[in-house]
Amino acid sequence: MHLISNGITCNCILTNCLIFMKIKPTLRAADVLNGSTPMDFSKKKIIVADLDDTLTESKQPLTSDLIRILDILLKYRMFAVITGGSLTRMQEQVMSVMAGSRHLSNLIILPACATKYYKFENGKWTKVYEEDLTEEEKKRIYVAFESMFSELNYKHPQKIYGDLFEDKGSQITFSALGQKSPLEAKKGWDSDNKRRLEMKNILAKYIPEFEINLGGNTSIDVTKKGINKAYGIRKLEEKLGIRVDEMVFIGDKLMKGGNDYPVRTTGVDSIQVSDPEEGKLILKLIVERLRG
């Protein structure tokens, strides 16, 4: 079903309509921090953020500084993490290090590009939903990767750190240097995203029925069609009763092809950070504004 309004075709994931919305421009963190592009955070009821390369270095736990900032933020607002990482990774990076907070009921975790949703209630983390891939779907994804590698005549690096693929149940993630590759190696492998964008475009020919996005520095994430970070924003809207214009999203991959990019189709205000330091400064600014 296609709906046209003011020349724009709209896509509603939650009602199974295929909708294409005008992409909302994202704000640069540097401009928000220096005041040249002001934002009224007092009107935002929930702060939503990516994790790796936005709040932390790749696959690293939250720093002590950021834990303190988030603990204060959770006193005033809800905070959600939408990440390409697995639930296990979220437990290591976020849930365990935030365990001492008195405001965990305001923290929401959406792992694997929002294909899973967890909230803290009655003293424990509770699953709200999970959009798992079937075994047949996973097989098609793996075959598509092999076909893409063949078409590109792609040779895997001689030095691989751990498995190239991670099955997150609801998401298959390919990491070009392996799941355990060191940060130094990751940063130099595809700094301009060109390698993975080429891979993504070819994969889309073989598995057009799936969502394909870039994650982190060396990864490609594959989920069910329409199940992405925009889906997570809509689920937050549905579950919490908070409108999209009452949210702000912070991420490092908001460019086209990045796994944060889909959130821009929802109309949510978004802030592009260049690294975790900028991410921390944005959250610190929000806390300062909310505390008055």
Image (cartoon, rainbow, N blue to C red):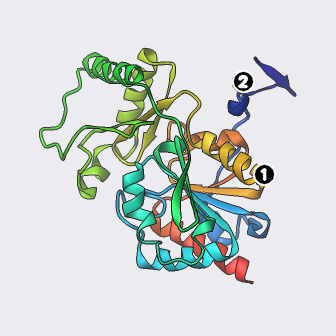
Q: Is residue 9 above or below residue 55?
A: above
214 in relation to 270, above or below: above
Q: Is residue 244 left or right of residue 88?
A: right
Residue at mark 2 to residue at mark 1: CA–CA distance: 20 Å
Q: Quadrant of the N terminus?
A: top right
Left or right of 41? Residue 149 is left
Residue type marked 2 = Cys
Residue 191 visible to an observer of this rendering: yes
Percent of width and height locating residue 233: 65, 46
Closer to the camera, 195 or 162? 162
Residue extending farthest to the bottom is: 292
On residue 17, the disc is 2
Does label 2 or label 1 sit earlier along the sequence?
2
Q: Is residue 268 visible?
A: no
Q: Which residue is mark 1?
A: 243
Tell me the crowding category of disc 2: few under 14, some 14 to 19, or many 20 or more residues within 10 angstroms, Cα based.
Answer: few
Q: Furthest-front residue in view?
A: 122
Element type where label 1 sits in the image: loop
User: Could you tell me residue 231's position as x and y percent?
Assistant: 62, 39
Q: Tell which residue pokes out farthest to the right in this image.
A: 6
Q: Residue at x 36, y 41 (%)?
A: 219
Q: Position of residue 60 (x, y in %)?
A: 35, 63
- The kind of residue on which mark 1 rests is Arg
